[in-house]
Image: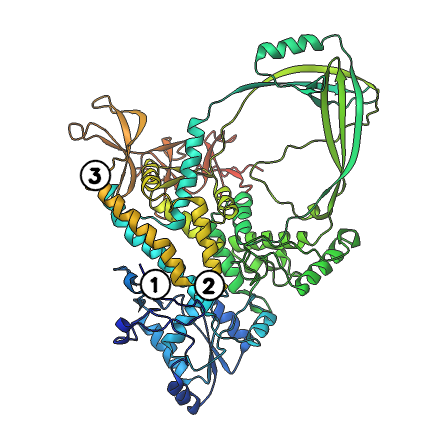
Amino acid sequence: MPTKKASSTEQPKESAAASSKASKSTAAKKPKAAAKPKGTKTTAKRTAAKQQYKLVIVESPAKAKTIQKYLGKGYQVMASMGHVRDLPKSRLGVDIEHDFAPEYIDIRGKGQLRNELKKAAKHASFVYLATDPDREGEAISWHLSNMLDLGGEEKSRVTFNEITKTGIKSGMAAPRNIDINLVNAQQTRRILDRLVGYKLSPFLWKTVKPGLSAGRVQSVVVKLIVDREKEIRDFVQEEYWTIDAKLSTARSKKVFAARLASCKGEKVEIASGEQAQQIMQQLQNHDFVINEIKKGVKKKVPAPPFITSTLQQEASRRLGFQAKRTMKAAQELYEGIDLPKLGAVGLITYMRTDSLRISDEAAQGAREYIIGRYGEQYLPEKPRVYKKKTNTQDAHEAIRPTMPSMTPEQVKESLTLDQYKLYKLVWERFTASQMADALLDTVSASIGCGDYTFKASGYSVRFDGFTALYEESKDVPEEKSPALPELLEGETLKCSDLEPNQHFTQPPARYTEAAIIKALEENGIGRPSTYAPTLTTVIQRGYVEREGKSLAPTQLGEVTNDLMENEFSSIVNVDFTAQMETNLDLVEEGREDWVQTLHSFYDEFAKNLEQAQQKMGDTRLEVPDEVTDIICENCGRNMVIKVGRYGKFLACPGYPECKNTKKIVQETPGLCPVCGGKIHAKKSKKGKTYYGCEHNPQCPFMTWDKPVEEKCPSCGSTLFQKAGRGGKLHCLKEGCGYEKE
């Protein structure tokens, strides 16, 4: 298909189709060279009017309130409440035949807001567009500029990395033109997602089931989770053995462990219990003698400040927050919190970033706090600078506190629990990133026993450094190696125990939310800002479900993924999807044409879609039901799990002969403190777990607190654990009041 050349630096203009109703619909049909924007007459009228204030438009009311405080009189700050225009929901809204010209329409329900913004802009002496400092924010500003006819007002775009007095002052002092490259990058992503969603969804509805969707990023997420499940399913467990010795010196009663490592210099691998016993026999009547001791000092370097992805990962591991919950709290902290004596203050910098850069002022603020709180020994000679990763967008700083001296405890009373936990995490991580290395004294010993060699190692902390404040958590906790006693080369050791231990290789773990975000980041798929909504989507569509902290594919997810792999391999190809992200970055940098980028994807995609439609015809794939071990009491069949309007339920597979159905009940170890019935775990409409009696509604007992196996020592009833970390155990039996200290 021939294409029209369009520079990514060119400004989109209204399409011919939209020109008849310009207030409702505009599109980047045929971008032309940066023309003299429209609106000079309106601008002149505005200038001639009574000039009382300058208008600043942001995205959220909370942000508007904070900025208004800093700008004061002479400014009016209003919120656009996100996007004011978007592609229509009811149709494709992209003219594929004319270089993918998008048709933008006013978002329904925002008519009054648009009128208020237009009225305020008309009477303002100047309009500043201060939406979020990223692609999405740039696009919102572009749409606002078109809606308000601000084309004649150059350098109306301002951005704030932090919502503080300094941040606002810096942003207002550096107005610029709208970055069309950023707008085009956002527009390209939006159109890509629309093309995939609107073209593939009907195919999936016809082939699998109604209500499904596909997407460039969401389909790859499902593939990663399905592939991991197949790895686990296909995993063949292998047996292996280790031999461990418990040793001590004649000078110390402290016992330490050593593990068999080699025989005559060759690594020992023990495949069976018989082989282990043979080695055990060979070890008999031999002394354990220290052949070599190595001592050293190991440095531990602090983790860098957070970027969006690492914040989501660490909040998941340490706080148990889902990505959506993390970003909500981060947004609130960025936009502004009311503090005593200070008013509304943004407590952290912009939370959508993949840059590790921090300002000199922030580094100095951290250093001043560290030296005052911990002393000079905890301060490195120079402020730490962390290397940026490849494909990093360096427009914003890393996520850090706007005021390093403002400790979490100082603002705790002004924050919600989620805000406090996240601010504490951000503050500690940032402050620790500017602290001195931790120093560990390490000791490793090589211990001979006949032809065999055992290894023992340990460490002790010489200087705690940054770990005095914070240490990054891991998906798999590191094994602790306690310090060894004082050892001497040539010394004979006493063996108090020599034990063979059986082990089995373990399959790879299912992805947790933190692990899948890490995988997406490492593979260059999506952007940190898209991780949270993508995970929400694949769960809502029923492709993936949570099992504790793990993410597991459903039968629907596996069937849909297999179809996508067979018919649309590029959509779910990790490398292809990563390359598309790189192309979007090139569009943002003005090095790639946005129309050509769309053609490079869509032309091949359209061919694949046509071929898949012809191949599948009227075929509908069957999604197998999940079989349970629960027996239908009416006909003796194993019941299966079905999904209905109100969620999952048990049903007999003999339908319509047998129409038996049951609720899926999750029992707990507790008994109802009111009537003695079993307590079931249930879900609220918002998905939060609560606990209620099996005899509901006859018995009204319900609680958010989790029942445990432990019984009340006072009355013998079930004890319940209060919500939150370190929640106390207490009794809910009326009249008891027991609470475990």
What's the residue type where badge 2 is placed?
A: Arg
The percent position of residue 725, horizontal first and vertical second, equals 54, 43
Mark 1 vs 3, N-terminal side: 1
Tag in front: 3 or 2: 3
| Residue located beneath label 2 in the image | 135
Assign a secondary structure to mark 1.
loop
The percent position of residue 240, horizontal first and vertical second, equals 57, 19
* Quadrant position of the N terminus in the picture: bottom left
- Above or below, comparing residue 434 to residue 541 in the picture: below
Tag in front: 1 or 2: 1
Q: Quadrant of residue 649?
A: top left
Tag in front: 1 or 3: 1
| Residue located beneath label 3 in the image | 619
The percent position of residue 529, horizontal first and vertical second, equals 47, 55
Q: Is residue 210 visible?
A: no
Question: In 3D space, how far apart are the residues under numbered discs 3 and 2 (Cα atoms)?
Answer: 41 Å
Residue ranking furthest to the front:
2
What's the residue type where badge 1 is placed?
A: Thr
Query: Dot 1: within a 10 Å radius of its alpha carbon, few (fewer than 14), some, or many (20 or more) residues?
Result: few
As rendered, which of 334 and 692 lies closer to the eye?
A: 334
- Above or below, comparing residue 283 to residue 433 in the picture: above
| Residue located beneath label 1 in the image | 3
Q: Is residue 241 visible?
A: yes
Assign a secondary structure to mark 3.
loop
Look at 60% across and 58% down and name the residue there.
400
What's the residue type where badge 3 is placed?
A: Thr
The percent position of residue 74, horizontal first and vertical second, equals 51, 83
As rendered, which of 431 and 142 lies closer to the eye?
A: 142
Mark 1 vs 2, N-terminal side: 1
**Circles 3 and 2 in contact, beta carbons < 8 Å:** no
